[in-house]
Amino acid sequence: MSSITAEEFGLLAKYIHSICGVALDSTKTYLIETRLKSMMQQYSCASYMDLYNKVKADRSGNMEKEVVNAITTNETLFFRDASPFELFKHKILPDLIDARSKANPGRPVPIRIWSAACSTGQEVYSIAIALREALGNLNNFQISILGTDISDEAVTRASYGKYNKFEIERGLPAQTLNRYFTLMGDGWKIKDEIRAMAVFKKFNLMKPFTGMGRFDVVFCRNVAIYFTPMDKKLVFEKIAGVLEPDGSLVIGSTESLTGVTEAFEPRRYMRAIFYQPSGTPAGRFAPGVQPPSQPFAPRPVPAAPPAAPAASARPMGAPRAAAVAAPAAPRPAPTPATPIVPPRPEPPRPAVPAAPASPVMAAVTPMEPETQAPGEAAPSAPRRAPVRSQPAQVYRAGDKSDLKRLLMQKKQKAAS
Ligand SMILES: C[S@@+](CC[C@H](N)C(=O)[O-])C[C@H]1O[C@@H](n2cnc3c(N)ncnc32)[C@H](O)[C@@H]1O
């Protein structure tokens, strides 16, 4: 088999960019060679030019799919980077539930999440498990998680939800494995109660987002790193167009939107950074984004809760303050989702008690202050903070530290 020439590389790189947006410069010659090697053999190609011509001539689209499957990097793992899932459970989700339960009093709280390059599904199931752990019984929620990827091989695997020992050992604590997976042959399969929370579809981020529906949270992690700066900008601006105004975008831990687009403003929560649509209309109606027609159909989620701690039995769908029978006292303010710049002067705060051990309680741990993310530029038009009538707090029955904190806060408020 001949090695790839500069001309062949140029043609194939241009073709690959046109079908999936993956940008390959001449330093990636080896990547095209190694990843397309098996197609070369399968289709008895004498040269890469021969393969290129066969792919271009294939009207069935099957060879194009094979190129996409071969070129895309599906590297992923459960709870990848950990902090995005902590951010999701402790900040994004509680804020979302507060906002949506106020907007839908007495009705199941809708939560729509999109994992926009979900690979073989680990990200989607990590989100679903995080939701289950944080919320316990999901009866009072209408949860829909959409997982999409350009690779149909990846989407098929994601949809099946079966993982081998190696994949399982990467990122899944034993307790989580036992609770949410079933041993099946040589691997582990996600349990139906988690599987049913998600819908998987093949979707190319380079295409218009028409008909995608709207989302409260989008995870678009570790995919835009393969795109040109222009494609990256367009993808994130299309995402801004399908996110609710108070929705959140989570990107990869090594990624940043600084200098990419002004459609988002960065926010910081503890060690994690996430993004929300900018206050200006620019991000809301980005070029190429049309109003959605048919959102994907959310499925009802079965109610069987995992072995969750008793504290999870709070009436869900109600604002967090109503969670546990507790003193009917004013709730301390969570940090409002203000733009991270300019940084706000922090008044002295009472000591915050240690984070509770229960995952459910952890989901509603008081918020850390948001500050400017390192290396992030000041957004030009800071977004106005959403008005909160009452800040949220959950009380654990029998826990005096909550009561003590309340009294301290009352004292402090009276003094200020
Ligand atoms: C490295 S994986 C990231 C998976 C997961 N988000 C994570 O962070 O673990 C990148 C995924 O992006 C997908 N991808 C690449 N180009 C894409 C495109 N144009 N549209 C949708 N997905 C794409 C690949 O198929 C691959 O599964």
Image (tube, rainbow, N blue to C red):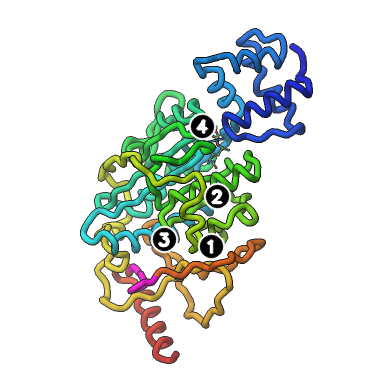
Q: Earlier in the sequence, mark 4 or mark 2?
A: 4
Relative image position of residue 62 (x, y in whole percent): 52, 17
Q: Give residue 231's quadrant in the image.
A: top right
Q: What residue did someone put label 4 on? A: 150
Pointer 4 with pointer 3, Cβ within 8 A = no
Q: How many discs mark residues in the rendered view?
A: 4
Gap in angstroms between the C-alphas marked 2 and 3:
23 Å
Amino acid tagged 4: Ile
Q: Does the magenta stretch include residue 87?
A: no
- Cβ(mark 4) to ligand 1 < 8 Å? yes
Highlighted magenta segment, given as a residue range: 387-394
Amino acid tagged 1: Arg
Q: Which of 304 and 11 is in front in this view?
A: 11
Pointer 2 with pointer 3, Cβ within 8 A = no
Residue occupying the point 41% across, 31% down: 159
Q: What residue did someone put label 2 on? A: 251
Relative image position of residue 21 (x, y in whole percent): 60, 35
